[in-house]
Every structure is written in C-alpha cells, then in structure tokens.
Amino acid sequence: MGGCTECASKGACDDRKGAMLDGVRAALDRVYPSRTWGQPDDAARYRAGVCEHDGEALADELAVALSASTLYVPGGDEAYCDFIYVQCVGREPNLAQVVYAGVPLPDELDGGADELYLRVCLSSMAPLAAVQQTALTLMRDAGGAAIVERPRPGVYDPPLLPRMQRLVAILPAYGIAHVDFGEICAPPPGFDAGDYPARYGGEPLVVNYLFYPEPPTTVVTTPV
C-alpha cells in the first residue's frame, strides 16, 4: 500500500500542516519575546487565547454534535489553558465529574471503572486547541479509593478517531485553530528552558509554553 508520499491529498495535508506550524511559531514569538520558558509577555497574552465563555459554549456544542458527555474544566493556577473532557467510553455519572465537578462517587462503581476521554486543551495564550486522549481509572484497595488519570501525547485508539475528526471540524467556528498534539511534543528551536529542568526535569516542549507546564503524560492520582 502507498504511504503519504503517494496520497492524492498529500499536498493539501502539507499545506494545512505548514499553516498550523506557522501559527504555533507566531504564537511563541509573540508571547515569548525573551524566548525563555516561564517568561511570557503578559500584555501579549492578555485576552489572546480561548476565553471561558467560548470554552463553555464549545463544550455544550460538542456534547450535542458528538453525542457524548462533556465537561468544561478551568485550568489550574499554573496552567495556560482550560480543558474540555469528552467522554468516549464509560457511563454517567462519570469519573471526570467526580474529580473535577465534585459529583459524589456512584455506589455502583464498587468494582472499579475504566473510562476513556478526549481531552481538549484550549490555550489562553493564543486561539489554539490541542487534543489528547486520557484514561481515568477508579482503583480500590483496603486503604480506600482513588481515580488515576493517564493522558497520552495524542489520540491513538481507533474508537476515538471519528469523534476526534468531528471535534476538529467544529473548532474553526469559534476562531480556534487545531494543533496536532504530536507537533507540539518537542522543544521549540532557539528557546531557553529557563528554570523548567529544575522544576519538572527535562526540557520544556512547545505544549509547555502554550498550554500547561507539566509533561504531557503526567499521571495524576486523586483520592476519592
């Protein structure tokens, strides 16, 4: 079978990828004139990204368009983005609602649960969105229960791909450009890591400049 080099759509794909990367580079140059992680220009990023109103509206539209439970989650104190969790595998009330919306843990989940989501990352630095899949697992032992979240650096599982494609098609209506997650999982050339290695280990990736500081596959455990 032929690869991308023989695909009739390769030229259009290359054009889209080029425009996407140009947008990422422009955002980095605008928000980080010092070209140093941890030193964004506050004036440059002020109201430059996806606002809460649009994020909540997008979550509502995705729930209908994707026939899925969605949850808008504001980013933490150090994040430069908010999130939308789109449930693809599991039932309601779901584990994302337990962790991020304070919903009580359902009694029927005594034996544990495994759920799969698309996690939409909405940058507050620029009108950009990136999507990664994440799994939430309820684990129980003699010491109690905890929900473990394991994000991946992109979207890989086939059952998620149709919803992923429809999700991406909706973003332009909100003035949001989609960025392939794999394209932001490398350090930006010519930028200084600042104190990132001391705080997180390793070099900061593009995602750490424009979306959130922690490594994109950081596992988070929440006692419940």
Image (spheres, rainbow, N blue to C red):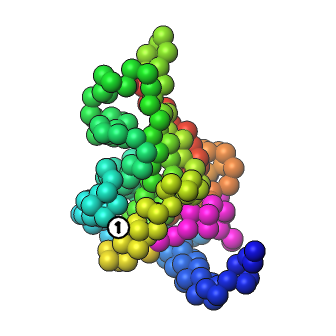
| Spot occupied by residue 216 in the image (x, y as percentages of width and height) | 57, 51
Q: Quadrant of residue 46?
A: bottom left
The C terminus, quarter of image: top left
Residue depicted at x 40% and y 41%: 90
The N terminus, quarter of image: bottom right
Residue depicted at x 45% and y 40%: 115
Residue linked to disc 1 = 50
Residue segment shown in magenta: 178-195
| Spot occupied by residue 14 in the image (x, y as percentages of width and height) | 63, 84
Q: How many marks?
A: 1
Q: Is residue 35 visible?
A: yes
Few, some or many residues within 10 Å of mark 1 (<14, 14–19, 20+):
many
Residue depicted at x 49% and y 56%: 160
In this rendering, the answer to whether 100 lies above or below 140 is: below
Q: Nearer the viewer, residue 96 or 220?
A: 96
Which kind of residue does numbered mark 1 sit on?
Val
- The residue at the far top in this view is 142
Left or right for 142, reference 189? left
Residue depicted at x 43% and y 16%: 144
Q: Quadrant of residue 94?
A: top left
Element carrying mark 1: loop
